[in-house]
Image (cartoon, rainbow, N blue to C red):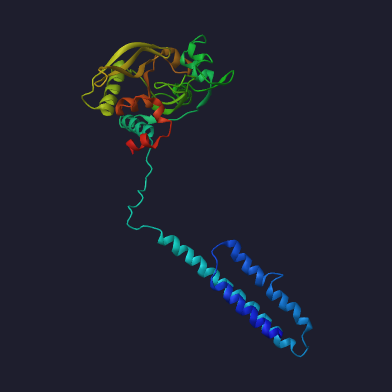
Amino acid sequence: MSLLDKIDSVKKRFLADIENFPLENDKINHIKSSYLGRKGEVANLFLMLSSVDKSEKPKIGAALNHLKKELNTLFQKKLEENSTSKKNKANSLIDLTLPGTIQRYGSKHILEQTLQEIKEIFTSIGFHVAYGPEVDDEYHNFSALNIPEHHPSRDMQDTFFIDPTTILRSHTSNVQVHLMENEDPPIRYIVPGRVYRNEAISYKSYCLFHQVEGIYINEKVSFAELKGCLEYFVKRMFGDKKKMRFRPSFFPFTEPSAEVDIWDEERNQWMEILGCGMVDPAVLDNVGYDSQQWHGYAFGMGVERMAMLKYNINDIRFFYNGDIRFMSQFS
């Protein structure tokens, strides 16, 4: 058999092999290496070219180059057809009569929604919003706020210490100290942010939660103004008919101090929502304000508690476990 006949034979066998082109990658690669690989059929034909008569070499050499080019082209074409066939087969498995997949849209976390509502209420009556450090020193978190060294909140059992004098803030009240140190009165701010306490995690307590601190310093500020401000807040937050009360309490940084309760119809009892009071003169003196001239009030509330009371949520852990079934109720 002449070399030209062998060329023709290789081409016919190649066409027969790719007629039923396999779908598996290993079988496809086997066909390619058998004909077009380094030790394949075409490579062997090129080796035989050396034994051909000199006068025939140009003609046979051209035939071999044409064969190699043609087999490569046919192989690539079949490869593309095979890929298209796979896609069509996959598409044929799709049942277009089935209902479509519902696209879920993201939304703000319920705590962020509650915090936004609180901020909107207070900014509507002249409060500005300020933020401050979550990592602070003992002075700004405790001492400047008239909290004595022996107070239980300064123990490692209640507060997260980074080093002996640096802590994760246990309330946003530290920011009011920074504000008063850097601004001359009058000032009127709310301070939202995360706070940290070393508490056992349960349905009503968590090691991390959110607070909103409020402070107003001016001349001739009275407790009556504080009551009016918080009554306005409660009506906006919980509705005009929500019953509320002030009852005496104690905080080291306010004097007199009070706690605010609202009536919970479902539990049929009073529920505390925030603490408040007139800023203690010692706090004003600590930041360099003249406590004889300047007076003010302060209040603080937990955002989680507000959300729990407003939306009847009975476990604080729901806010942090990432359960989409819970989150989707408020989207």
| Residue 35 found in image quarter | bottom right
- At horizontal 51% and vertical 18% (from top left) the residue drawn is 159
Residue 161: % across, % down: 55, 20
Quadrant position of the N terminus in the picture: bottom right
Of residues 70 and 252, the one nearer the viewer is 70
Residue 57: % across, % down: 74, 86
Res. 92 in view: yes
Q: Residue furthest bottom?
A: 55
Res. 215 in view: no
- At horizontal 29% and vertical 26% (from top left) the residue drawn is 233
Residue 165: % across, % down: 57, 19
Of residues 137 and 8, the one nearer the viewer is 8
| Residue 37 found in image quarter | bottom right
Q: Residue furthest left?
A: 241
Quadrant position of the C terminus in the picture: top left
Q: Is residue 51 left or right of residue 308?
A: right
